[in-house]
Image: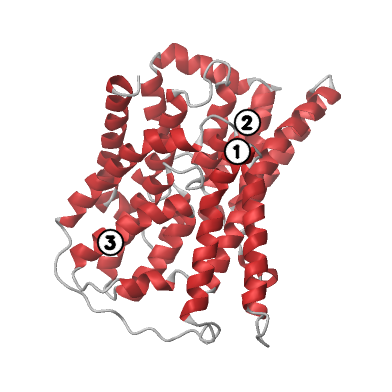
Amino acid sequence: MINIILIVFIIGYLFITLEHKFDLNKSASALLTAFICWSLYALLSPDIEHVIEHLNGHLHGIAEIVFFLLGAMTIVEMIAVHNGFELLTEKITTKNKRTLLWIICIITFFLSAILDNLTTAIVMVSLLQKLLSDRQDRLIFSGLVVIAANAGGAWSPMGDVTTTMLWIGNQVTASHLLLTTFLPSIVCLLIPLLLASRHVKGSFERPIIEPNDETTSLSKNESRWVLLCGLLCLINVPIFKTITHLPPYMGMLGGLGILWVFTELLHRHKEDKTHLRITSVITKIDVPSVMFFLGILLAVACLESIGFLGKMALFLEDTIHNKDMIVTFLGLLSAVVDNVPLTAAVQAMYDLQTYPTDHKMWAMLAYAVGTGGSCLIIGSAAGVVVMGIENISFGWYLRHISLWALLGYLGGMGVFWVLYHTIII
């Protein structure tokens, strides 16, 4: 049974990683893979009640992640629709390329921790298109945005789907994640940023951008208030969890409710406000990505239920013997294998009794799978979306950005090793 389900999972995963070649959305492949895996488990298992019990148990944890993502994505889309992120562009007045690179990367790093690396990458690359007219400059800047977004997302429970998974799964707490991964994440960005600064010279001129008719009716104060309200709702999620001990998705849904009421009151006297209402904005969020997370997490949960992931954990222990090396390897593997199922697999392989909340391994894993994907353009969701927006080829990124990203990743992992062996432990 294990071998049959594993073969189905591998075939499904190939379709996910090669979605552009097969012209089949990875969300469809993930959902179908989960469906077939669990169906085979039910048909081949002698105890169907045991299978249903496993499925229901996994669905509880997965649903928390899905509701969290839906709330977060809707809040971010509301800020975007209200031109909240445009306010950032207006504050950038420099004409120097090197200065602009540092400003963009620093903003990306911190914004990614509040929003998430995928959304931040989309926002920042869109802003770059309004700031830089030269395509070669935008390619370099976009490559650094990928690194900065992934590095920024690694030290926040909301910055990356994988850190959210570890936070909701009680592998890490928000405060410990910040304490242990912030410095390595900064180093992970600074090394590529310093190397890239040597190749970026001169000044630039902004391209002329036509205003958007849909949002010209918005005042600067309205955009500013929605940006402030949305960011406060996102920032307060970990605070809410700390105070109430309720699951994070409750804080996120509460924040969405607050922003919903706030925007309804803000636009209550406007005649044409349909495009500014959440009922309209919610149709624009990336639901296929949410379906992908649902499908892939269910598929990985099936591998855990049949006992395969437990055997894989024992194999890694017997082969490598060193947890630091295992986690470092997993981080590099995330450049090839999607970090969401990789994280789900590690969560299933190592239990909280052996590796309790805030154990060294979990923090290192959050950093590794969050930043290791930057080594390849296809290694992270942020990289894939930037690849599509700027039409960056795999080969160009490999030649110009990958080495910088690898050096940053290894540098941050080195800082982790120093922290845990001289300060934290």
Query: Under tag 3, what secondary structure?
Result: helix
Callout 3 crowding tier (Cα within 10 Å): few <14, some 14–19, many ≥20: some
User: Mark 1 near mark 2, Cβ–Cβ under 8 Å?
Assistant: yes
Instruction: Work out whether mark 3 precedes mark 1 in sequence or the reverse, and give the earlier one.
Output: 1
Query: Any mark on residue 11, and which?
Result: 1
**x 51%, y 40%: residue:** 162
Judge from the rendering whether residue 296 lies leftward or rightward of residue 157; answer left or right: right
**x 66%, y 36%: residue:** 299
Residue 18 screen position, x and y as percent: 52, 48
Count of labels in the image: 3
Q: Nearest to the eye among marks 2 and 3: give it.
A: 3
Image quarter where the C terminus lies is: top left
Q: Which residue does the numbered mark 2 point to in the structure image? A: 7
Judge from the rendering whether residue 203 lies leftward or rightward of residue 225; answer left or right: left
**x 47%, y 72%: residue:** 224
Q: Which residue does the numbered mark 3 point to in the structure image? A: 103
Query: Under tag 1, what secondary structure?
Result: helix
**Residue type at mark 1?**
Ile
Residue 275 screen position, x and y as percent: 63, 78
Instruction: Work out whether mark 2 precedes mark 3 in sequence or the reverse, and give the earlier one.
Output: 2
Query: Under tag 2, what secondary structure?
Result: helix
